[in-house]
Image (cartoon, rainbow, N blue to C red):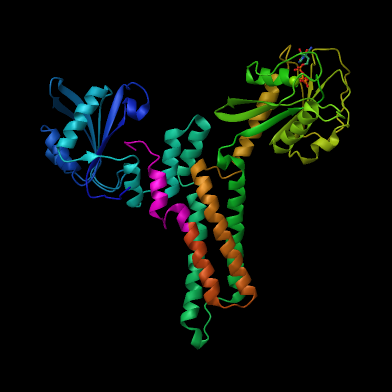
Amino acid sequence: MQFETESTICAIATGTPNATGSSGALRGALRISGSLTLEILRRLFKDLDQSLLESNHARRYPGRIELPELGCIAVDVFYWPDRRSYTGEPSAELHLLGAPILLEQVQQRVLASGARLARPGEFTLRAFLAGRMDLTQCEAVLGLIHAQGQREFQVALTQLAGGLATPLKQIRQDLINLLADLEAGLDFVDEDIAFVQPGEVSGRIEHAQRQVSSLLEQLENRQGQGVDFQVAFVGPTNAGKSSLVNALSGTEISIISDIPGTTRDYVRTKVRWKGMQLDLVDTAGFESVLEPGPRAIAQEKTREILSDADLVVLCNSVQEQATSDNSEFFRQCPRLWGVWTKCDLPHQEQLHWYLSIERSFKLSVFSGEGLEALRQGLIQAIELWHQQSVDVVPMTGVRCKASLSTAAQSLTHAQEALLDSAGDEIVAGELRLAIGELGEVAGTVTSNDVLDALFSRFCIGK
Ligand SMILES: Nc1nc2c(ncn2[C@@H]2O[C@H](COP(=O)(O)OP(=O)(O)OP(=O)(O)O)[C@@H](O)[C@H]2O)c(=O)[nH]1
Ligand SMILES: [Mg+2]
């Protein structure tokens, strides 16, 4: 991709099969951006009030445009004369009926008036090059375009508002200040003037280290890689695990029978609650299997699922006494809830878990009792999970982690250099590397490869 920003670009932004994948929308928009925007508007809309067009504010005009064979059509013209536009340069949007034939004909007129067709992502690229957005925000725009569901949309919106960029910029700025202090000291080394004491340098680097590793830790959380919250349903055979997963997901994905050991391979179902996606994983019931074979492998799989899950739900029938037999299974699971199943059947008043259980529910998939309480409990758990992490669109997550790890390494080297009294030049060199890496995340320092990789994923018109 060439970063040519001289020409005025135009593209249909919505309302056509290309842009939306649908066969047209009620309203369509055509975007124009570049220095010729005003001139193009003048050529297209002879009836436009020139004094309004020359105003310094963003304006909206009811225009009319004559199209061959189609006649005169109404067009709403939005015009941004200055840097307040999305791209940071004079821009306009023409809003009209979403019929593809109309949009294409208007686009032809715009092209004939001096614009060229925009490349994918070129509007957002211009916004980036004009300093209107940092790279994480450009990726957020891409995240918004591709968001599947409310949750992904929300993550992208938060990122667009500067969610990740704000703490990163602060860490980077602190390090730049520290570097400036060190470099000032280097200039006056012969006079033996220190602008900052070694103990203070170490403290300031340590502060940055803590912040970088906290960001990294939060990004390590699987949300950054687009992995959903995993809930594993485990327990003795015949406890009603598959029935519960089917009931929660509203599917019949798992086979149910009264023969113990019906589920062998684990079964994963995706559900979306309150716009948040999660995985419900049904597993093979606990059995003691002595000889090798599929049943033993199924037990091993259950163990793996259990240690990978974000939340484990141990199911036990109210008619069976819970036992501590499998307590070693739970050693690695991060959170354990308990569900007493089949509560429609006669059972004792007092039910007792042998394991330490964070939350306990009693339910029946036959009567429906308790099902909604469990569902609400799970929703709360996922909401909390999302709140506890810096959530970023997957693309930013991958890019960011690589840069943060390198920055963390440089900061460690800087600390080691301080300990070894290797000299301020060495410490400054490491700080410069860390600052560069942190700058790459926000796009303060970028290579064309990164920009190419990012903007080629956009659609035309964005
Ligand atoms: N009365 C009653 N029976 C239930 C309930 N839930 C499940 N069952 C029955 O219990 C039996 C076992 O149910 P499953 O869901 O297959 O149990 P499971 O835990 O998946 O069993 P495995 O796959 O063998 O580990 C079936 O006959 C279900 O119809 C319930 O809420 N009440
Ligand atoms: Mg089952």
Picture coordinates of residue 106 (x, y %)? 20, 29
Q: Say whether residue 285 is visible.
A: yes
Residue drawn 76% across and 13% down?
Answer: 257
Q: Quadrant of ligand 2?
A: top right
Q: Position of residue 136 (x, y in %)?
A: 45, 47
Residue 338 in view, yes or no: no
253 shown above or below 414: above
Report the magenta residues as a range: 439-462
451 and 124: which is toward the camera = 451
Residue 462: where, in percent of width, then height? 34, 38
Look at the picture and state if 244 lies above or below 412: above
Q: Is residue 412 above or below residue 140?
A: below
- Which residue sits furthest left? 46
Is residue 117 left or right of 345 when viewed as pictured? left
Q: Residue at x 62, y 50 (%)?
A: 217
**Toward the viewer: 449 or 136?**
449
Q: Is residue 207 left or right of residue 239?
A: left
Q: In the figure, residue 202 lies in which quadrant?
A: bottom right
Q: Residue 138 in the image: state x and y as whole percent.
A: 41, 44
Q: For residue 239: magenta?
A: no
Q: Residue at x 47, y 39 (%)?
A: 156
- Residue at the image position 30 percent from the left and 48 percent from the top: 88
**Residue 407, quarter of the rendered image:** bottom right
Q: Is residue 443 magenta?
A: yes
**Front residue of this view, candidates 74 and 414:** 414
